Amino acid sequence: MIDLTGKTAVVTGGARGIGKGICETLAGCGARIVIADILEKDAVKTAEGIQEAGGVALALKTDISDLASVREMAAKARARFKTLDILVNNAGWDRMKPFLKTAPEFWNKVIDINFKGVLNTVYAIAPAMVERNSGKIINIASDAARVGSMGEAVYSGAKGAVISFSKTLARELARNGINVNVICPGPTPTPLLDDMKAEDGFAEKVLSGMHRIIPLKRMGTPEDIAGAVAFFASDRADFITGQVLSVSGGLTMC
């Protein structure tokens, strides 16, 4: 069993979907959880569920696209738990549509949340990890970044930036005992995916038959992703850094 007792994990976008699964799994491994999410009510509900199960969790409303908001979250988390040992950059947002039918306002939102949000959290939290010469950073990208995804050109680009940033960060922070790795989920049913399908028939068409082309014949679950996060957050992954792991049921194999 993975033991994260005594560790504090910050999980962005931890209120629901994959992020909620990550929070619950890490809490089950003994970690104290900071749920940093703009969806405050959902974050509080997830924190209450963790506490009812015997864990420790703190919900903090956070806009990851705003560095000041991220810094405020980090300060509150440190005031409560002293050290922040694990950072999971999970928060993301997208809508599925062909690139030529998008607009600059859409590009900015996708990039602000999916890439700049990662820059903000690392910028706010990593310096304290450097001071302690210890820390685990796990960035959630996407298989869309690795192989492309119909209707997700800007999202794929932003997540590709997360992968490149993570590899460079892994090199820069290795001397400080900080591991940086990336997990790329395949299609996973979440409230965000449901919103995308409900809003646009294009998304429904692309996603409806996805399970049939996945070798393991099903789409992923938040728990599938969370298990990989727990591994990277643990001492079992102390000699692994700068790596990209696809958790997609075999949808991509390169």
Image (cartoon, helix red, strand yellow):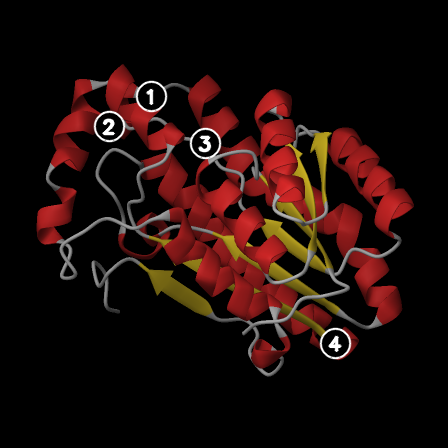
Rendered location of residue 61, percent (x, y): 70, 27
* Percent x, y of residue 79: 91, 44
Kind of residue indicated by mark 1: Thr
Left or right for 222, reference 241: left
Q: Nearer the viewer, mark 3 or mark 2?
A: 3
**Inter-mark Cα distance, 1 to 4:** 42 Å
Please, what secondary structure does the residue beneath circle 3 have?
Answer: loop
Q: Quadrant of residue 204?
A: top left
Identify the amino acid type marked 2: Pro
Amino acid at pointer 4: Gly
Image point (14%, 34%), residue name: 208
Q: How many marks?
A: 4
For the residue carrying disc 2, how many other residues have a C-alpha within 10 Å: few (<14), some (14-19), or many (20+)? few
Instruction: Please tell me which residue lies in front, 73 or 66.
Output: 73
Query: Which residue is disc 1 drawn over?
Result: 102
Which mark identifies residue 93? 3
Q: Whole-Å distance between the Cαs marked 4 and 3?
A: 31 Å
The residue indicated by pointer 2 is 98
38 versus 190 height, above or below: above
Q: Earlier in the sequence, mark 3 or mark 1?
A: 3
User: Closest to the observer: 189 or 210?
Assistant: 189
Q: Earlier in the sequence, mark 4 or mark 3?
A: 3
Write the residue at 53% across / 45% down.
90
Tell me if I can see residue 132 in this picture: yes
Gap in angstroms between the C-alphas marked 2 and 4: 42 Å
Of callouts 2 and 4, the N-terminal one: 2
